[in-house]
Amino acid sequence: MRQVNQHKSKLFKFSTVKSLHKWLSLLVFIQLLIWLGTGLFFNLMDHNKARGNYNKQAVVVQEINNQRLLNPNLIIAMSHVPVSEVTLVQRLGHPYYLLTHEKGLYSHFKSDYSLLDAYTGTELIVDSNVASQLAQASYKGVGDISSVVILEPPIADMLKEKNTVWQINFLDDLETSVYVDASSGRLVGHSNEDKRFVDFFFMLHFMDYPFLGKGSVGSFNNGQITFFALLTLAFCLTGFIWVIELLRKGHYKFGL
């Protein structure tokens, strides 16, 4: 009787392994199919449209009068916040000192800046009016500005961006949106309907699903990928156990 119970227990365990393997195979197959489909789409798509830069133009750089530039040390002394770096930049064709108070490793990482007029030392606040002018300077389309909104991350069109930005929306056929960093006046980028369509496939490809709670990150560096890797590992292990069991029962025969 004891041997019968042990045999039934082994059959139950092996049956559980087989059932788990079959369900895992379905989940792994679905995601692999999504990867193949989206990978094919990325190879066939129009890469120029995917960048969202159809209405983007280069910002005109004006000549700077070096004789009028204030001493950067004076600019640092005028700041009430510690400054780690001073850079001469242009905004709307005018020179400004970009004061770095906090700087991320990359431009889209969390940072803190302020802008001071390089000729007068007057601070430039990147408000909705300045942001609109900066966006207009980078826009070559024919649409008018329909709205200006300040956004905190996560930002749907710019998932990697970790800074507060102004979103300037234009009335054109592509529903162009221009994003400007709220502290530095940096042009974060352009987006439109073409880019948003491609971003949907990137979301599927990266398993970067925003509805899972923590929001998207715009890359493979997310919890969903880790979880899928564990599922795939479990799929391989259950398959390995199944093969071992079939070998033990003599279902595989090897011959010359």
Image: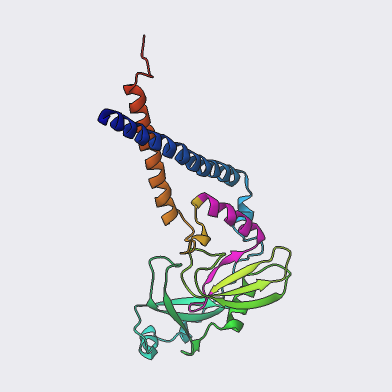
Magenta segment: does it hold 188?
yes
Left or right, residue 49 beside residue 89: right
Q: Which residues are magenta?
A: 181-205
Which of the two residues, 157 or 53, is positioned nearer the viewer here?
157
Q: What is the total number of numbered labels drawn onto the structure image?
A: 0
Is residue 224 visible to us here?
A: yes
Tell me: residue 220, above or below residue 185.
Answer: above
Which of the two residues, 132 or 62, is positioned nearer the viewer here?
132
Left or right, residue 6 beside residue 252: left
Which of the two residues, 175 or 249, is positioned nearer the viewer here?
249
Q: Position of residue 203 (x, y in %)?
A: 54, 55
Instruction: Write down the quadrant of residue 172 in the picture.
Output: bottom right
Image quarter of the C terminus: top left
Instruction: Write down the quadrant of residue 252 in the picture.
Output: top left
Tell me: residue 179, above or below residue 25.
Answer: below
Q: Position of residue 17 (x, y in %)?
A: 38, 36
Q: Position of residue 200 (x, y in %)?
A: 59, 55
Is residue 221 visible to us here?
A: no
Which of the two residues, 49 or 150, is positioned nearer the viewer here?
150
Point 48% across, 81% down: residue: 96
Q: Position of residue 48 (x, y in %)?
A: 62, 54
